[in-house]
Amino acid sequence: MKVGIMQPYFLPYIGYFQLIAAVDLFVVYDNIKYTKKGWINRNRLLQGGADAVFSLPLKKDSDALDVVERELAADFNRQKLLNQFIGAYRSAPYFEPCIELLRSLVMNEETNLFRYIHGSIVQTCKYLGITTPVEISSGVPADHAQKGEDRVLAICEACHADTYINTIGGLELYSRERFSQEGIALQFIRSLPVEYKQFGKAPFVPWLSMVDVMMFNPVDEIRDSLLPKFELI
């Protein structure tokens, strides 16, 4: 049983979906502190040959709240966000199928930040043909009062994991020896360079939202050639 655990991110880069595809069970945190100025509710798209940020506006609230306790702003203009994608990608080769997915994700009337993002993750996986089950962390019977590595191990043990796969950024955070003591192998996933034809002759802009990948590549190409472009170390 290979398990991955991550914060929720709205339309993140391809590496996030590579991790989901690489594991047997993906756990997404809902009961974890919202990270201000992080990437939970924002990412980047291609606009005029350069990267531009898109974001989900949030209701003003305490920075101490968990993600699941945060709400989208009452004046969040979903159509304006959708129009940002339309304006950026209307000439992309796979605009039609991708914009239908985005319309479903962006126009979702859910107001809770976590549930809004969770829905987008699940639907994007379905679009890409990723069949890995996505579990919500609060539904895992583990001690969620624990922190850091201890909490990850508790979740892994509750999910009967024999392997935990983390993003490459976790190299400095987690100990292979500690995981091994609990009978769990620890691996790290590193995305390899992914490049494809974007608009015109401008230099390729890497590591944008998964939306960019989907706008310029057919689903079977993404699934068979781009999602497997990673290494486990």
Image: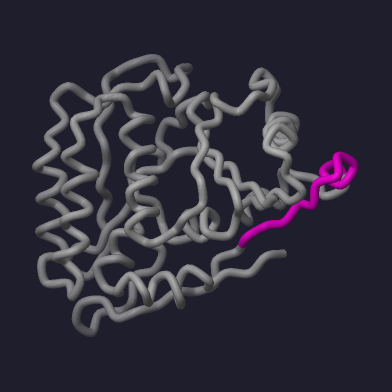
Decide which of 155, 193 is in the foreground and name it. 155
Residue 175 to residue 193: above or below: above
**The C terminus lies in quadrant:** bottom right
Relative placement, left or right, of 195 versus 101 is right
Residue at 23% x, 84% y: name it. 201
Residue at 25% x, 25% y: name it. 111
Residue at 37% x, 77% y: name it. 221
Q: Is residue 116 magenta?
A: no
Q: How is the image coloured?
A: one colour
Tell me residue 36's x, y (percent). 42, 31
Relative placement, left or right, of 28 versus 173 is left
Give the magenta part as a residue range. 178-189
Decide which of 219, 32 is in the foreground and name it. 219
Quadrant of the rendered image containing residue 44: bottom left
Residue 74 to residue 78: above or below: above
Decide which of 117, 64 is in the foreground and name it. 117
Residue at 64% x, 22% y: name it. 144
Tell me residue 10's x, y (percent). 35, 44
